[in-house]
Image (tube, rainbow, N blue to C red):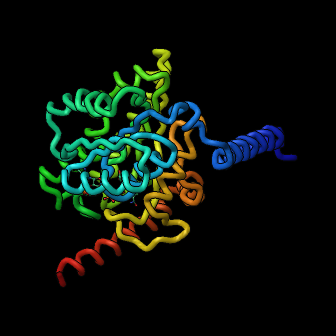
Amino acid sequence: MPLDQTYIKPLAYLGLLTLTKTLLTLTRQATTYLLPSTLRKTYNPTQTNWAFVTGATDGIGFGFAQELCLRGFNVILHGRNAQKLARRRDELLAQFPNSHVGVIVRDAQTLSADIDHVEQEVRDIIGAAGPGTGTLTVLVNNVGGEVKPVTLLREYSFEDVQRTISCNAAFAIQITRVLVRLLEESDAGLVLNVSSLAAFGMPYLSAYAASKGFVDSFTKSLRAEFKAEGKKVEVMGLRVAEVSTAGYDVKKTLFVPEGRVLAAAALDRVGCGQEIVWAYFWHWLQGLSFEYLPRSVLMKVAGMKLKALRADLDAKAKTS
Ligand SMILES: NC(=O)c1ccc[n+]([C@@H]2O[C@H](COP(=O)([O-])OP(=O)(O)OC[C@H]3O[C@@H](n4cnc5c(N)ncnc54)[C@H](OP(=O)(O)O)[C@@H]3O)[C@@H](O)[C@H]2O)c1
């Protein structure tokens, strides 16, 4: 008796549909890296507007500050160390004499209601720059990192977990809440939230990875909220893989850029229309594996790499 073959054609059509959808998605994602950025035109047409960067004394954050000054912004640097902030402000002013640079000191690991005063501090900094200076149009939520690198959850103390969540997640939502009025007062506002590959869920990084997952969800919710309210504030999440910085001491390669290169790439993505985007093209290429390979395979590879890194850090700690 011949087999029933009625399912063959529908399956072939479904396969074709899946292939078309995958090719369209990949083409859309790839063209993101060719589109011109709308940063200057939309958020700094007068070359007098301000950007606020959290965790701006080193790594990707300082890279953002440099690249924003290069694009004609005045910047407010946030950090926890007043001396280092003053040094970085002087470096920026020497490099970009036409920019105004202000500083805000707050420890992102130990949040308190005192953060509410930041709005007035920012208004004072902008006011002190004199007439003709613009408004706050850009907020970069960059501060973050692992409080205890590659660690089993049971090895964390109560404080370690609280500090990790505060620095990577809570500070971003609180500082955005505090600055949102200033952003809404501008003709157009932009919030960039720095996330991580770790948000996919990684072994040995559970507290850090979870806090970056929080950041992604915050990005999506706030973006939808501004849209629902008809506000001209754009929110975009930035997915980041390995970057050679003070906080992540790895050799620079094509796939591991320096902080400033990553920051420039992120600013180039502004206006691409994606909710969460890989800032840097070569990270996007790596990231495709997370969408198309089975999670069990990826976690095996990530587990081996992070376990080796953990052994390496342990060995270094014992000899130092
Ligand atoms: N580097 C990577 O491979 C990588 C990968 C994925 C995602 N990311 C994300 O990218 C962002 C920046 O990372 P990075 O590698 O550039 O970090 P980094 O080189 O360690 O620099 C972090 C910056 O944040 C500041 N900071 C740290 N803790 C703070 C606190 N409690 N209060 C106030 N400021 C604080 C640091 O100030 P001090 O100078 O005082 O320490 C520094 O300016 C983070 O959100 C990180 O999770 C990085």
Residue found at the very far left of the displayed protein? 158
Where residue 263 sits in the image (x, y, percent)? 47, 52
Residue 12 visible in the current orientation:
yes
Q: Residue at x 15, y 44 (%)?
A: 110
Q: Residue at x 19, y 33 (%)?
A: 115
> Quadrant where the C terminus lies?
bottom left
Q: Residue at x 35, y 75 (%)?
A: 308
Vertical position of residue 234 compared to residue 86: above or below = above
Rendering quarter of residue 135: top left
Q: Is residue 261 rendered to the left or right of residue 185?
A: right
Q: Residue at x 45, y 46 (%)?
A: 69
Front-lying residue, 253 or 208: 253
Where residue 258 sits in the image (x, y, percent)? 45, 63
Vertical position of residue 204 compared to residue 98: above or below = below
Vertical position of residue 224 compared to residue 198: above or below = above
Residue found at the very far bottom of the displayed protein? 319
